[in-house]
Amino acid sequence: MDETFRRLRYVRYADDFIISVIGSRRRAYEVMQQVRSFLKDPLCLELNLGKTKLTHARKNIAHFLGTDIRWNANITDKKVSKRKRSN
């Protein structure tokens, strides 16, 4: 695992997006700050702090566009699972 190589997954729909970071919480925080800076300076946009958070995929569920996203260790090939929310 090369520390200088960033492992990210990014999904965007309209003005909502989610970024998955394989790495430390510190690395995820750095990515969030870089995104925040990019949105603010060239684009004059701000992150919605009510919707913006860092979540550990093995411990918590991320909510994105009505879907719960979490790491499912029960799957043999270790894929991320998703399911529609019922509310």
Image: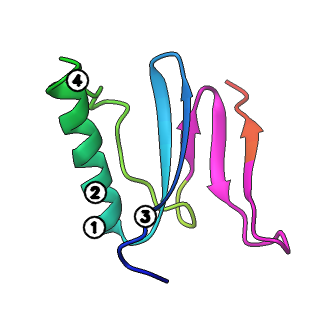
| Residue 6 tag number | 3
Position of residue 69 in the picture relative to residue 36 (left or right): right
- The secondary structure type at the circle numbered 3 is loop
The residue under label 2 is which amino acid type? Tyr
Looking at the rendering, the stretch of residues picked out in magenta corresponds to: 61-81
The residue at 25%/57% (across/down) is 30
> Which marked residue is nearer to the observer: mark 4 or mark 3?
3
- The secondary structure type at the circle numbered 2 is helix
Q: Earlier in the sequence, mark 3 or mark 1?
A: 3
The residue under label 1 is which amino acid type? Arg
The residue under label 4 is which amino acid type? Glu
- The secondary structure type at the circle numbered 1 is helix
Residue 2: give x, y in percent of width and height.
Answer: 44, 81
How far apart are labels 2 and 4 at the CA level?
Answer: 16 Å
How far apart are labels 1 and 4 at the CA level?
Answer: 21 Å
Q: Nearer the viewer, residue 70 or 38?
A: 38
Say which residue label 2 marks.
29
Looking at the image, do the residues carrying marks 4 and 3 touch, with CB atoms under 8 Å apart? no
Q: Is 65 contained in the magenta span?
A: yes
Say which residue label 4 marks.
46
Say which residue label 1 marks.
26
